[in-house]
Amino acid sequence: MRIIPSALACALLAGCGSEYTIVNRSSVRPSASSQIAARGLVGEAPAVTEHLAQAYEVYTAQITLLKQRRNKVRARERGLRGAVIGALTAGSTAAVVVGATGDGSENDRIQGASFVALGTIGVALGLSHIRGEQEDPIIPDMKARQLQKDFERMLDRVKELEAEADATTGDPARDAARRKEVTSAISTTIEAFITEATAINIKG
């Protein structure tokens, strides 16, 4: 009988022990490969290249965390489903054993079996409730798909701006001013993506 409340308590701790994981932007450092990829998009402008490389690293980190979260939620859901089945099976077996071989009179055995059955139902209902309160695995998947779309949209916009910067007027001063304006627009676009990506809350 002590096993029943213990199992429920453990399940409650497992179900309620989550906290949100947020990518710390200051700890994300662009790798050599991301910097090479960035230079392929925006040339050799150091500030913009570094910025875009950091955006790629943030994107990669968030996608990885979202996939890990999805797998964790799925595993937890499978574990709780198995726990419900296991509790019902063990409780049913225990009730039969108590009713058939327990000490005392027949009424005592029936009463003991009833207590075991009621405890089993309580545990199964508790586990089912915890299972119902868990995050749906589709949510991390949806967040990952949206993040991927946002990243691709950001890259497309950066390419468009780079194409605009490549167009020359023949006037060096105007071209330089235009290049500076486009560089600022690229940085703003990249920064907007990083801000949105790091704002995603991922339960741990």
Image (cartoon, rainbow, N blue to C red):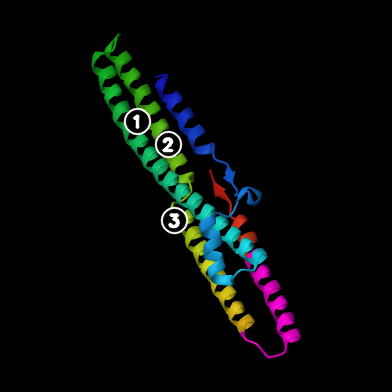
Residue nearest the observer in this picture, 141 or 42: 42
As drawn, the label of residue 127 is 2
Q: Position of residue 14 (x, y in %)?
A: 48, 35
- Circle 2 Cα neighbour tier, 10 Å, few/some/many (<14 / 14–19 / ≥20): many
Mark positioned earlier in the residue sequence (3 or 1) = 1
Secondary structure of residue under mark 3: helix
Secondary structure of residue under mark 2: helix
Q: Which residues are magenta?
A: 167-192
Label 2–label 1 contact, CB within 8 A: yes
Q: Which picture quadrant has residue 3?
A: top left
Give the labeled residue for mark 3.
138
Give the labeled residue for mark 1.
87
- Circle 1 Cα neighbour tier, 10 Å, few/some/many (<14 / 14–19 / ≥20): many
Residue 48: in sight, yes or no?
yes
In the rendered view, would you say 168 is above or below 103?
below
Q: Position of residue 83 (x, y in %)?
A: 36, 34
Q: CA distance from mark 2 to mark 3?
A: 21 Å
| Of labels 3 and 1, the one closer to you | 3
